Structures are given as C-alpha cells and as structure tokens.
Image (cartoon, rainbow, N blue to C red):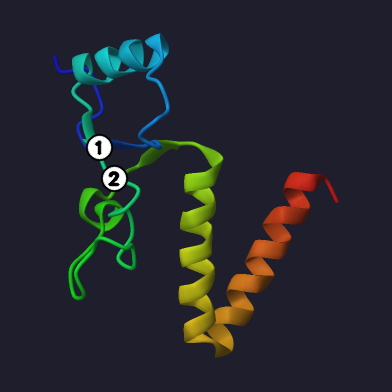
C-alpha cells in the first residue's frame, strides 16, 4: 500500500544567506519518505516576470506548480506584487472581482 501525497509538489523559496534550519532537514526527509516531490527555485527565477527569466519562458512557480510554498515574507511580498500587477493590467471586471474578493478575504482574516 502506498502512503503519501502522489500529486503533491512542495516548493521552497528562501534568500540565499538564510541559514538552513534543522527542521528543514526533518521536513524534507518526511516529504521524501511520503513520496512528495520537492522543487527548489531561485528568487531571481520565481515568476514569469523575474529578473533572470528570458521573455517568453516560464518562472519556477509556473513550471513546478506547487501545492505548498515555504518561504519568508519578503518573497511572498514579491509574489503578491506580481499578482496585483497582472490583475491591474487586465483591468475591467477582472480587477473589480479580484479587488472585491481580496477585500472580503482580508476582512474575514481581520475578523470584521
């Protein structure tokens, strides 16, 4: 019997100078033992619009298609900025729906 996450893909995006923690090694061991794929990406190639990505190619997040991303807040801020930029470029109804959903989710998190 196979026990694990056959369709799971976990990605880790950490700044290079950040020291690796012992818990990281334990987590990685548990993920590998359960059959979970692990993808490591660079902060410079994370999104389609990152600095080190050639035009017309896809970033690490698109290619790996992770179900979970482990990261630090600064990296998540970059992802948020890219999402806001792409939604802003689409404009119209897409932007209005996104803004509505975003504000509603933020209100539920803050408890309003």
Q: Position of residue 33 (x, y in %)?
A: 20, 14
Q: Which residue does the image show at 45% across and 37% down from the upper left?
A: 71
* Count of numbered badges drawn on the protein: 2
Label 2 sits on residue: 42
Label 1 sits on residue: 40
Q: Position of residue 72 (x, y in %)?
A: 50, 37
Q: Which residue does the image show at 77% across and 54% down from the upper left?
A: 107
C-alpha separation, residue under disc 2 versus residue under disc 1: 7 Å
- The answer to whether residue 81 is above or below residue 19 is below
Under circle 2, the secondary element is: loop
Q: Nearer the viewer, mark 2 or mark 1?
A: 2
Q: Nearer the viewer, residue 32 or 101?
A: 32
Q: Which residue does the image show at 34% across and 68% down from the upper left?
A: 49
Label 1: how many residues lie within 10 Å, few (<14), some (14-19) or many (20+)? some
Image quadrant in which the N terminus is located: top left
Q: Nearer the viewer, residue 87 or 100?
A: 87
Label 2: how many residues lie within 10 Å, few (<14), some (14-19) or many (20+)? some
Q: Quadrant of residue 92?
A: bottom right
- The answer to whether residue 48 is above or below residue 74 is below
Q: Residue furthest left?
A: 1
Q: Residue furthest right?
A: 112
Residue 91 is marked as none
Residue 37 located left or right of residue 78: left
- The answer to whether residue 30 is above or below residue 62 is above
Q: Which residue does the image show at 37% across and 19% down from the upper left?
A: 20
Q: Quadrant of residue 70?
A: top left
Q: Residue furthest front?
A: 17
Under circle 1, the secondary element is: strand
Q: Quadrant of residue 13?
A: top left
Residue 23 located left or right of residue 31: right
Q: Position of residue 36 (x, y in %)?
A: 23, 27
Question: Label 1 near label 2: C-beta < 8 Å?
Answer: no
């Amino acid at each position: 019997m196979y026990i694990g996450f056959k369709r799971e893909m976990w990605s880790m995006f950490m700044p290079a100078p950040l020291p690796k923690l012992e818990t990281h090694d334990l987590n990685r061991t548990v993920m590998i033992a359960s059959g979970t794929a692990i993808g490591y990406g660079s902060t410079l190639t994370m999104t389609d619009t990152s600095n080190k990505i050639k035009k017309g190619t896809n970033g690490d997040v698109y290619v790996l298609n992770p179900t979970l991303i482990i990261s630090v807040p600064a990296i998540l801020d970059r992802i948020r900025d890219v999402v806001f930029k792409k939604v802003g470029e689409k404009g119209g109804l897409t932007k209005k729906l996104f803004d509505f959903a975003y504000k509603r989710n933020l209100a539920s998190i803050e408890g309003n």
